[in-house]
Every structure is written in structure tokens, then in C-alpha cells.
């Protein structure tokens, strides 16, 4: 509906910019109130990452600190969002963050990156205090590193504490499938790192024991979810005959090809070689 609304405008991206500027902290629910108790942008970023799913359940934020910029990066998995809302959200971030620092004489500007191609007739004249670059590898906002430690005066610390509790309750209330989906998402974006239970728990802001308990309630384990993701990836790799079984087992962090074959057969009912041969027959037909 929102995408159709923007498309109906004479200049959709002018509407996107105005929409992003209008997303004040007060419109971000409990997360917005919690942020008003922060003391600097590091704390704001950590709160946003921890509780972002209370606002956008299918997306998460990654925080990346570079030599000159601090980055809040949108992570989206298996969801085809239109080009409007990722940009509107990041413009909202810029507007909120710079307003939190409006009592400082800021040096430098924010930079917003977008993965989409540059739209025709983009209204650059409406941008104030930040820049947008298209055809980038991530949807993200980059803040000058010097801004991160500038002090912010908390508006209502006691109310912010209550808002954090509300955020915690909202996170716990997310459906069980959301938890499994988030684990799969984190495994996919971190597949080169071979995440363990403790690392996953840290990414989900829970203790390892809590994560294990919640997964037991869903009749599964982190080990099973992780194995399932690896074997789903294995099916895709088997479609490419340039990958040997040894190479696939190495890429998916199995100890050897024999262990990979055993796990794949348990999961699918057939061996990797048979799966590859069956698929070749389907293609040839």
C-alpha cells in the first residue's frame, strides 16, 4: 500500500524524503522512548540494534565501526522490499540522530548508501546535511565517528527504563517462528564465520541457556537448525558440478566428505551424488 502511494506521486522520492523526515522518535513506539534516555550515539545505536525488531520484525541492524565512520546497516533476508521504505527509514535515522545532537556544532555530514540504481530525476535539492549514494553494496547510514561520543542529555531516564522493559516484553512476544527465522537469517549472513551457540545467543541478545530453552520449547535445537541451513546450501552447491563433494564439505564446515554425505543422506534420504545425478536428469528432461 505504501509503495503504491509513493508511486502515485509525481515525484515518488520527494515523498520518500518528506516521509523519512516525518518519522520522529515519538513515532517509533517504545524504542523511540528508550532512545530518549541514551547518553550518546553509541548507546542509541546499541538500543536500535537490540530492539529494532519491535519496529521491523523481518529486518535487523548491523553495527560496523570503521576508521572514520560508524555504520548502521540494514540487513534484509529473503524479503523483496521495494526501493522506497529502506531509503525512507535511513532518512528517518539521519533526521533523528542529528536532532539528538542539535546542541552541538557538528563537523562533517552523514552518508546514506542505497543498493538500488540511481532513480531518474532524484530530488537532490531536498537533501539537507547529508548525502545519498546509489549502487552501493548495502543499505546503510554512515555517521562521522567524531559524533558518536558527543553527549546527549537524556529527556526522561525513568520513562526510558520503562520503555526498555516494554521492548524486552515485545521481543519475547515475537512468535516462535520469528526466533527460528532470525537464527536462520544470522546463519546465512554469517555463513563464513561458522557461528556457535554462544555467538548466536550474543547476536540475539539472550543468554545461551535461554536460547537453548526457547528452542527446546519448539522441539528443536540450535545444532539442528544450523545443520538444516548447511544442507539447504549444499543442495544449491550440488547443482554446480564444478564443486566436488570434498570442496562442498569444506565450504560448509564438515570435517570431511564422508561426514557430509552421511548428514546429507539423513536429511534428504539420498546421497549427495545421487541428488546431483537426479537433478541432472531433471534438467536434461
Image: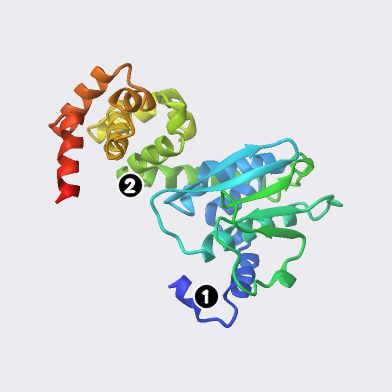
Is residue 71 shown left or right of residue 257?
right
- Is 212 placed above or below 46 here? above
At x 72% / y 59%, what residue is drawn? Answer: 131
Residue marked by disc 1 = 6
At x 74% / y 35%, what residue is drawn? Answer: 67
The earlier-in-sequence mark between 1 and 2 is: 1
Q: Residues within 10 Å of mark 1 (few under 14, many from 20)?
A: some
x%, y% of residue 162?
55, 45
- Taking the view exactly as shown, the residue that stands out farthest to the right is 105
**Count of labels in the image:** 2
Res 221 → quadrant: top left
Residue closest to the eye, 47 or 148 = 148
Q: Does the rendering let one see residue 179?
A: yes
Residue marked by disc 2 = 175
Q: Residue 75: give its label.
A: none
Residue closest to the eye, 153 or 8 = 8
At x 56% / y 49%, what residue is drawn? Answer: 138
At x 12% / y 32%, what residue is drawn? Answer: 269
Residue closest to the eye, 172 or 117 = 117
Q: Determine the CA span between mark 1 and mark 2.
A: 31 Å
Q: Secondary structure at mark 1?
A: helix
Res 176 → quadrant: top left
Q: Residues within 10 Å of mark 2 (few under 14, many from 20)?
A: few
Residue closest to the eye, 101 or 249 = 249
x%, y% of residue 95?
69, 59
x%, y% of residue 85?
52, 63
- Is 215 placed above or below 50 here? above
> Coloured how?
rainbow
Q: Secondary structure at mark 2?
A: loop
Q: Does the rendering let one see residue 159?
A: no
- Is 265 placed above or below 103 here? above
Amino acid at each position: 500500500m505504501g509503495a503504491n502511494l509513493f508511486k502515485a506521486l509525481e515525484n515518488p522520492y520527494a515523498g520518500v524524503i518528506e516521509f523519512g523526515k516525518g518519522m520522529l522518535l515519538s513515532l517509533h513506539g517504545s524504542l523511540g522512548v528508550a532512545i530518549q534516555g541514551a547518553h550518546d550515539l553509541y548507546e542509541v545505536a546499541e538500543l536500535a540494534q537490540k530492539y529494532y525488531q519491535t519496529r521491523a520484525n523481518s529486518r535487523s541492524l548491523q553495527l560496523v565501526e570503521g576508521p572514520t565512520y560508524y555504520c548502521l546497516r540494514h540487513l534484509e533476508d529473503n524479503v523483496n522490499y521495494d526501493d522506497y521504505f529502506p531509503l525512507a527509514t535511513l532518512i528517518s535515522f539521519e533526521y533523528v540522530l542529528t536532532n539528538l545532537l542539535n546542541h552541538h556544532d557538528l563537523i562533517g555530514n552523514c552518508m546514506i548508501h542505497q543498493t538500488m540504481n540511481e532513480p531518474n530525476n532524484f530530488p537532490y535539492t531536498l537533501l539537507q546535511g547529508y548525502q545519498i549514494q546509489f549502487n552501493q553494496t548495502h543499505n546503510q547510514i554512515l555517521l562521522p565517528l567524531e559524533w558518536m561520543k558527543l553527549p546527549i542529555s537524556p529527556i526522561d531516564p525513568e520513562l526510558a527504563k520503562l520503555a526498555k522493559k516494554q521492548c524486552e516484553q515485545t521481543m519475547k512476544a515475537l512468535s516462535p517462528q520469528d526466533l527460528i527465522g532470525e537464527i536462520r537469517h544470522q546463519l546465512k549472513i554469517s555463513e563464513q564465520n561458522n557461528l556457535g551457540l554462544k555467538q548466536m545467543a550474543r547476536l540475539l541478545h539472550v543468554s545461551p541457556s535461554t536460547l537453548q530453552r526457547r528452542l527446546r520449547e519448539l522441539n528443536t535445537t540450535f545444532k539442528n537448525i544450523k545443520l538444516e541451513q548447511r544442507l539447504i546450501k549444499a543442495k544449491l552447491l550440488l547443482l554446480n558440478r564444478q564443486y566436488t563433494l570434498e570442496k562442498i564439505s569444506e565450504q560448509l564446515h564438515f570435517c570431511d566428505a564422508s561426514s557430509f554425505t552421511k548428514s546429507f543422506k539423513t536429511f534428504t534420504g539420498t546421497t549427495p551424488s545421487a541428488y546431483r545425478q537426479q537433478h541432472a536428469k531433471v534438467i536434461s528432461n
